[in-house]
Every structure is written in C-alpha cells, then in structure tokens.
Amino acid sequence: MGFSVRPALPSDEEATERIEVAADALLVDRFGAVDWPPPTPPQERTAAPGFVLIAESEETIDMADATVVGFVHVLEVDGHAHLEQLSVLPSYGRRGIGRRLVEAALSEARRRGHLRVTLRTYADVPWNAPFYASCGFVVSEPDTPLLRSLIGIETDLGLFAYGGRVQMTAVL
C-alpha cells in the first residue's frame, strides 16, 4: 500500500477527529478505560499554533478519492516544537505510516528552525514510548514552563491512572 504525506486542509478536520477516536480505542481497550478524554476538537487543533500533516492512502487511482488514514499534530509554542498527537487508523497500523508521519513532522520542525521536538506518552505501551525511541526520541526531563504545564494537563485529564508517562525529545 502506498501513501503520501501532506499538510492538512480544513476539509480534513472531520477525518482527523475520526482517526483519533479510532486510535484512542486501542488505548481504551488496553487500559479498560471507561472515562477516556475525548479527542481535541478538530477546529481547535487546526487553529493552534503549529502544523498538522496528513497521511493519505494511495490505493485509488484518482487522488480525489484518496483516503486520510493518519495524522500528526505538532504544536509550536514559545519557540518550542511539541508533537502533540500522532494517530493512524488501526486498520492501517504496522505499515510504516506512523513512522513516516513522525519523520515528516521532524523534517518540517527542522525546516521551521527548531532544534528539537518533544512529546509526552505512555512509557510501557509498545506503540508509544518504545515506538518513539525507535524514531530517535529519548526520555528527557520537562525543562520549560510549557513542558512542565503538560504534566498538570495530563493529571487533570486522568491519564496517569493508566500508567507511567514520560517526556521524550528528538534532537534535530
């Protein structure tokens, strides 16, 4: 299966929400979570400073029929790049789409002048911290007000109830 990566368009908002809900279902099932937080509203995601990249399936001949199968969202706040969300439709998992989205996000962040990209994730979920480590991220400490504030947000969302979370950084 071929796929391409491109910047998100406003017309992709519904697809990104659908993809995040489907991808989050994997965590909900893994943790038996009954109160998992809802996805970021797509309009909020595209209005935030930063960028969203889309992965499209190229299984169709007419690109107008291409299917959005994944996305990555990178926030840019106070001169810092933070990978906020990576989601791929579970039916398209394990095909390199997530890795390609991460690589594209790192490349775009570098192009925009960033020296590193951070993220926060579950330490022991195989498609979380171990996957990001294979993409060049290493566990790091929150060293800016933004990064320290994310811990409070995760606490408020109840994410720590399901396991240890870590910050990871990729140097560009």
Image: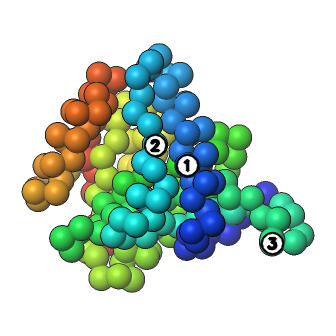
Q: Amino acid at mark 3?
A: Met
In the rendered image, residue 172, in percent from the top left (x then y), is placed at 32, 72
Q: Which mark is residue 57?
A: none
- Look at label 1 and name its amino acid: Glu
Q: Secondary structure at mark 1?
A: helix
**Among the 4 quarters of the image, the one containing residue 1:** bottom right
Crowd rating for badge 1 (residues with CA inside 10 Å; few <14, some 14–19, many 20+): many
**Residue identifier under label 2:** 39
Q: Is residue 51 visible?
A: yes
Vertical order, 82 against 92 (above or below): below
Indicate which disc, 2 or 3, sits on the residue closer to the N terminus: 2
Choose the circle earlier in sequence order: 1 or 2: 1
Name which residue lies at 13% across and 49% down: 148
Q: Residue 111's image quarter?
A: bottom left
Q: Residues within 10 Å of mark 2 (few under 14, many from 20)?
A: some
Q: CA distance from mark 1 to mark 2?
A: 7 Å
Determine the image quadrant of residue 35: top left
Left or right side of 125 for 150:
left
State the separation of the CA atoms marked 2 and 3.
28 Å
Nearer to me, 81 or 99:
81
Image marks 1 and 2: residues in contact by CB distance under 8 Å: yes
Q: Decide which of 148, 172 is in the foreground and name it.
A: 148
Tell which of 100 and 89 is nearer to you: 89
Numbered disc 2: secondary structure: loop
Residue highlighted by disc 3 = 63
Residue 83 percent across, percent down from the top left:
36, 58
Q: Which residue is mark 1?
A: 17
Q: Is residue 122 above or below residue 51?
A: above
- Say whether residue 91 is left or right of residue 157: right
